[in-house]
C-alpha cells in the first residue's frame, strides 16, 4: 500500500505543475550568469588601439509582470533586470601612455517579453526586446579621458519551466549591440556582448 501511495504521489506532481498558471502575475527573482564582451580603446590620431576582454560572472535580480491570454497560449509581459558584478579594470599602454579601461559592474535593463505558454508541460518559450544601460570609461588613473554611457538595444530568448505552483526556473540568453564614442582624440568601444542567466523566479498571482 505504501508503494502504491508513493507511486500515485509521484504521478500527481507533473499534473499539479501543468495545471498551474504560474506565468500569470507579478514576479520577482534572481540568479547568476556570465557576461561576455570585448572593450576597445583607440588613439584616433595614430590609429593605434588596444583590446581587453571584459567577460565576467554576474549576479542578476529582476522584477516584472505578465499575462497569458485566456483563449490562446500567448504570453505578453514586461520586466526590469539588474546585472551586477565587480567593475572590470584593465591597465593598458596606448601610444606610450598608461591608461585604464573600466567596464562598470552595474547594468540595468528593461524589456518586453512575448512567447508561447505550453501549459500542459508547464513551460514558457519566450523572446524579449528592450534596452540595457552600459557604461565604460577610459582614464589616465587620475583624469577621465573619455566615457560612454548610453542605452543600447537588446534581443533575448529563453525558456521558463514550472517547478511548483508559484516558482519557476529560467534560462535566458541576451544579445546587445556594440556602442562607441569618440572625442576626436580617443575612441572607446564596447563590442557586441552576450549575457547568459540562470534564475529562480517567484510569481504572485494578480
Image (spheres, helix red, strand yellow):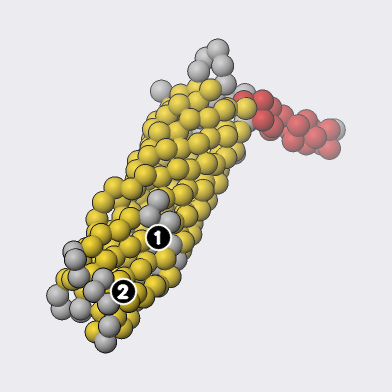
Q: Nearer the viewer, residue 11 or 117?
A: 117
What residue is pinned by disc 2?
47
Marks 2 and 1, Cα distance to the nearest angstrom? 18 Å
Check whether the beta carbons of the residues at disc 2 and disc 1 lie within 8 A of each other.
no
Residue 37 shown left or right of residue 47 in the figure = right
- Where is the N terminus found, in terms of image quarters? top right
Residue 27 shown left or right of residue 6 in the figure = left
Q: Nearer the viewer, residue 147 or 102?
A: 147
The x and y percentages for residue 181 are: 25, 59
Which callout, 2 or 1, points at the residue further toward the start of the chain? 2
- Residue 41: image quadrant is bottom left
What residue is pinned by disc 1?
191
Q: In the image, what residue occupies the spot 40% across and 33% down?
A: 112
- Where is the C terminus found, in terms of image quarters? top left
Q: In the image, what residue occupies the spot 45% across and 37% down?
A: 128
Q: Is residue 70 above or below residue 5?
A: above
Q: In the image, what residue occupies the spot 66% across and 25% down?
A: 120
Q: Is residue 164 above or below residue 94?
A: above
Q: Which mark is residue 178?
A: none
* Residue 86 seen in render: no
Q: Is residue 116 above or below residue 139?
A: above
The x and y percentages for residue 73 are: 57, 21
The x and y percentages for residue 176 are: 41, 50
- Residue 39: image quadrant is bottom left
Query: Comparing marks 2 and 1, which lies closer to the viewer?
Result: 2
Q: Residues within 10 Å of mark 2 (few under 14, many from 20)?
A: few
Residue 89 shown left or right of residue 70 in the figure = left
The x and y percentages for residue 95 are: 27, 83
For the residue labelled by badge 1, is the local secondary structure a helix, a strand or a loop? loop
Farthest-out residue, top = 71
Residue 146 shown left or right of residue 205 in the figure = left
Amino acid at each position: 500500500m505504501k508503494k502504491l501511495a508513493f507511486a500515485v504521489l509521484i504521478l500527481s506532481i507533473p499534473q499539479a505543475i501543468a495545471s498551474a498558471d504560474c506565468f500569470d502575475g507579478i514576479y520577482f527573482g534572481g540568479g547568476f550568469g556570465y557576461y561576455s564582451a570585448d572593450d576597445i580603446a583607440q588613439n584616433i590620431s595614430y590609429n593605434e588601439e588596444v583590446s581587453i576582454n571584459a567577460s565576467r560572472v554576474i549576479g542578476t535580480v529582476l522584477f516584472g509582470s505578465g499575462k497569458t491570454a485566456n483563449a490562446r497560449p500567448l504570453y505578453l509581459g514586461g520586466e526590469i533586470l539588474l546585472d551586477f558584478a565587480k567593475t572590470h579594470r584593465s591597465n593598458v599602454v596606448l601610444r606610450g601612455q598608461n591608461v585604464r579601461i573600466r567596464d562598470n559592474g552595474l547594468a540595468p535593463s528593461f524589456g518586453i517579453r512575448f512567447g508561447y505558454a505550453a501549459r500542459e508541460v508547464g513551460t514558457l518559450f519566450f523572446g524579449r526586446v528592450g534596452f540595457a544601460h552600459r557604461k565604460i570609461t577610459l582614464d589616465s588613473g587620475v583624469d577621465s579621458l573619455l566615457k560612454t554611457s548610453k542605452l543600447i538595444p537588446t534581443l533575448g530568448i529563453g525558456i521558463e519551466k514550472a517547478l511548483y505552483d508559484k516558482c519557476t526556473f529560467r534560462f535566458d540568453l541576451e544579445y546587445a549591440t556594440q556602442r562607441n564614442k569618440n572625442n576626436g582624440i580617443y575612441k572607446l568601444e564596447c563590442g557586441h556582448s552576450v549575457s547568459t542567466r540562470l534564475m529562480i523566479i517567484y510569481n504572485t498571482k494578480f
